[in-house]
Amino acid sequence: MLIVLVSLMGINAFAQTARTAPLKATLQLAKPAEMGASSSKLLIQDCDTFANLCASDTFAVIYTYGTGLYVSGQNSFGDISKADIFQTGGTTIKGVLIWFGVGKAANTIDKFNVRVWENDGTFNDGVTPGAPGSILSSKLVKYSDVAADVLAGALTYVQFSPAVPILNDGIYYIGVDFGYKNGDTIAVRTTLDRTGTECEGIVTAVEQWSPSYPPGGWIDYNSSWGFNGISHFILPITCQEVCELNITPGSPDICKNKSKVLTATGATTYTWAPAAGLDVTTGAVVTAEPTATTTYTVTGDGGACVDFVTVTVLDAPTSNFTVGNCISSSRLLTRTGTPTSGVTFKWFRNGVKITGGATNSTYLATISGAYKVQTKITATGCKKVSGEKNVTIDCKAGISGSAFTAEAYPNPFNQSVTINMASGSTELANVRLIDLSGRTLHEYVGVDTSAPFEINENLAPGVYFVRVSQGNTEKMIKVVKE
């Protein structure tokens, strides 16, 4: 049961009408969990609890103790149903608030029905009510719950689950169908004084007697009781469903020239803008591949709701490599591109990743094949794979091992390393000191091959190459500084 702070329990209150625009009433209404307190789509502020209210109505429960005749409840005539007609906008009827003036329960089991009926079609002039037609929704309510609400001075809240869709013409009836047992009695408060100009003369209440009491069927209160303009204190909670968009992922990052799937939920139809970088501009799911950081606007249900998502485009590295000249029986492959720091590498031969530490910016290829290198930015994960290059290892054909030799001693070394050369030629040699990236650190020109040649440079510990060339022959020696 809904607890309501009723400031209008006096003589001046509000009631519904079937034809006029709603007046905004001030009533503090507690928010029950079943009305969508945890819902992300339908919120309480999207519902008009006091749709179609009119001012200057005086409410009462008309009954006679001696005969037990209730205008709005079970009575000696064997009432079957009581209902009011409504005409309002909105999308759904979430529930109803009813102010019962009388509530008695024989036990905690007996129940009656609160119903929503479709109009039977005779309410066509906006003034004269017709009669309830097909039942749109029903909810069983305990007499004992109503009795407790009456005792507490509270309105009774009844929720329809699922919510009842409002028909195109917005015309429907809400009321009660009684169940009978000795000791069970309820009476909905009614209004007899309808002095407001919006409501005067409007008959909105109808009832259905037992077939044993003519005329039978549905009849308005003016015909049955002689009360003109009477209505019940029944307040439908009509809601306008407002879509609340949600886009996943919420703040996506993509690498340049890559794509990301974006999914919108919370509406029925979706429109995306701008079109740049999108595969489509309508529908819940799109694929985004912008060339620069872009904020996309998603509009749901033709403008009912709007959301935004920013797709951040991250720079991708460039990746290429050069193939060096013959170094003994191998070729040095050197990655080129940007950035030069904060990146990692993987080398591939014939489409297969090379194992065994092929993760530097250089790779000494000893086997012919199709090579490529992948460069990845560590911070973002963006990566780029170079194109393939065919590398042929044919260096042995131009080198005579017996004619020219070169060795390094000691190796590994601490401070300096000595290169011992032997050659059948008196031609002077060139010596280059190269780091792992392929960069020449020092070059020594015109070196006499008949004497040991010492390299004494201030080198950091690591792996280096010494390239010794004489004419068309050369030797590549790997040395290690400890």
Image (tube, rainbow, N blue to C red):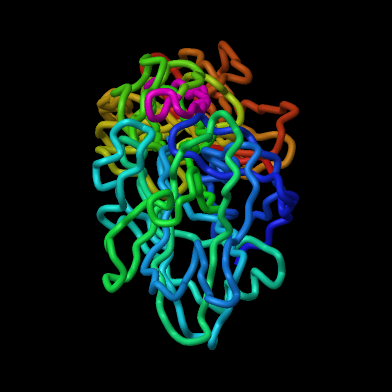
Looking at the rendered image, the quarter that the N terminus falls into is: bottom right
Give the residue drawn at x 48%, y 85%: 109
Is 303 inside the magenta-drawn segment? Answer: yes
Answer whether residue 321 is visible to the viewer in this image: no
Q: Which of 152/89 is in front? A: 152
Query: Which is the main secondary structure of the residues drawn in magenta?
Result: strand
Q: Is residue 24 left or right of residue 261?
A: right
Looking at the rendered image, the quarter that the C terminus falls into is: top right
Picture quadrant of residue 60: bottom right
Q: Is residue 102 left or right of residue 78?
A: right
Picture quadrant of residue 169: top left
In x, y percent, where is residue 253?
A: 51, 31
Q: Is residue 442 left or right of residue 469?
A: right
In x, y percent, where is residue 206?
A: 39, 53
* Image: magenta residue range: 298-323
Give the residue drawn at x 29%, y 43%: 352
Give the residue drawn at x 44%, y 45%: 204
Q: Which of 302/361 is in front? A: 302
